[in-house]
Amino acid sequence: MTENLTKASFLEKVFNFENNQAWSFEGKVPAIIDFYADWCGPCKMIAPILEELSEEYGDKLTIYKIDTEAEQELAAAFAIRSIPSMLFCPMEGQPQMANGALPKAELERIIADVLGVEK
């Protein structure tokens, strides 16, 4: 299951940007963070794909969702200008951003290549 994040839960589970200047991932497993809005057509297209991936990868991967309308400060902190935008957070190294409604095969490739997670 994907999990919706608020600013408070983001600071706790992903990255506390209020206390740290340099990226420091707080997660226990790699994560994908989907920046979306309820009115966004492409966001609605990829939502079921993200749910599928969440089930397929189980506890090897966490998928979070951030409503850019409700959490404008988080969207601004990551300079989100178009949605959907996804932030891929590996356990080590810097996160990588991707924009647009990516097909499932491309998401699986990124999960393997960037996050180092296999099914």
Image: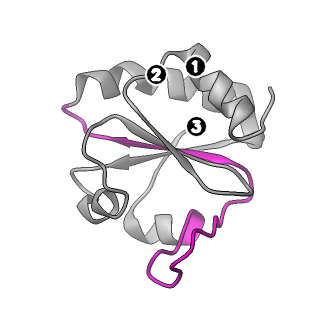
Q: Nearer the viewer, mark 3 or mark 2?
A: 2
Residue most extreme to the bottom = 19
Query: Quick one: 12 or 21, which is closer to the camera?
Result: 21
The residue at the point 81 percent across, 29 percent down is 118
Quarter of the rendering occupied by the C terminus:
top right
Give the magenta range. 12-39
Distance, label 1 to label 2, CA atoms, is 6 Å
The residue at the point 51 percent across, 21 percent down is 49
User: SS of the residue at dot 1?
Assistant: helix
Location of residue 68 with respect to 34 vertically, above or below: below
* Residue to which mark 1 is pinned: 106
Percent across and percent down for residue 91 are 73, 55
The answer to the question of whether label 1 and label 2 lie on touching residues, with beta carbons closer than 8 A, is yes
Query: Quick one: 16 or 39, which is closer to the camera?
Result: 16
Q: Earlier in the sequence, mark 3 or mark 1?
A: 3
User: SS of the residue at dot 2?
Assistant: loop
Residue 30 located left or right of residue 98: right
Q: Earlier in the sequence, mark 3 or mark 2?
A: 3
Label 3 Cα crowd, 10 Å radius (few <14 / some 14-19 / many 20+): few
* Residue to which mark 3 is pinned: 1
The residue at the point 74 percent across, 52 percent down is 29
Percent across and percent down for residue 39 are 18, 32
- Whether the magenta-drawn stretch holds residue 22 is answered as yes
Distance, label 3 to label 1, CA atoms, is 20 Å
The amino acid pointed to by label 2 is Leu
Residue 59 located left or right of residue 10: right
The residue at the point 34 percent across, 62 percent down is 74
Location of residue 89 with respect to 46 vertically, above or below: below
The amino acid pointed to by label 1 is Glu
User: SS of the residue at dot 3?
Assistant: loop
Label 1 Cα crowd, 10 Å radius (few <14 / some 14-19 / many 20+): few
The amino acid pointed to by label 3 is Met
